[in-house]
Amino acid sequence: MKTKDNVFSNLDITVTFDPCTCIHSDHCAKELSSVFQDSVIPWIDLEGAPTEKIIQQVKKCPSGALQFHYNKDDKKVA
């Protein structure tokens, strides 16, 4: 299935979402609804919380559909 790019960036990080991998557990929307909003488009708003909170939430994604990388080359991908 072909999907649109789901890439979202702020000054610090870029978050990607793979809808074909997502198991729709809703952990992201339930635990950090200021960033992950399932009722609006675009559904990810990286201005909704501090970068570190977003990173912590992305790391909790049970399917790995949410990923992130730092925008600066001097930091490693987590």
Image (cartoon, rainbow, N blue to C red):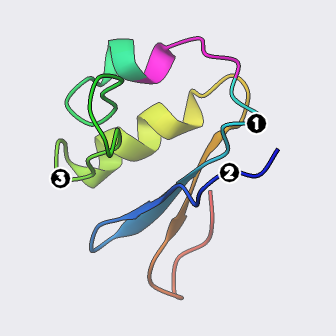
Identify the residue position indicated by label 3 in the image. 47
Secondary structure of residue under mark 1: loop
Residue receiving disc 1: 20
- Above or below for 70 versus 32: below
**What crowding class fits label 2: few (fewer than 14 Cα within 10 Å), some (14-19), or many (20 or more)?**
few
Name the magenta segment's main secondary structure: loop
Residue at numbered disc 2: 3
Q: What residue type is labelled 3?
A: Glu
Measure how far apart labels 1 and 2 are at the Cα level. Answer: 8 Å
Q: Which amino acid does label 2 sit on?
A: Thr
Determine whether label 1 and label 2 are within 8 Å by CB. yes
Q: Is residue 26 above or below residue 44?
A: above
The picture places residue 3, in percent across and down from the top left corner, at 68, 51
Left or right of 68 on screen, residue 53? left
Span shown in magenta: 23-28
**Quadrant in which residue 49 is drawn:** top left
Residue drawn 26% across the image and 23% down it: 33
The C terminus sits in image quarter: bottom right
Where does the image place residue 58, in percent across and percent down from the top left? 51, 38
Q: Is residue 54 left or right of residue 66?
A: left
Image height of 65 relative to 27, above or below: below
Front residue of 70 and 23: 23
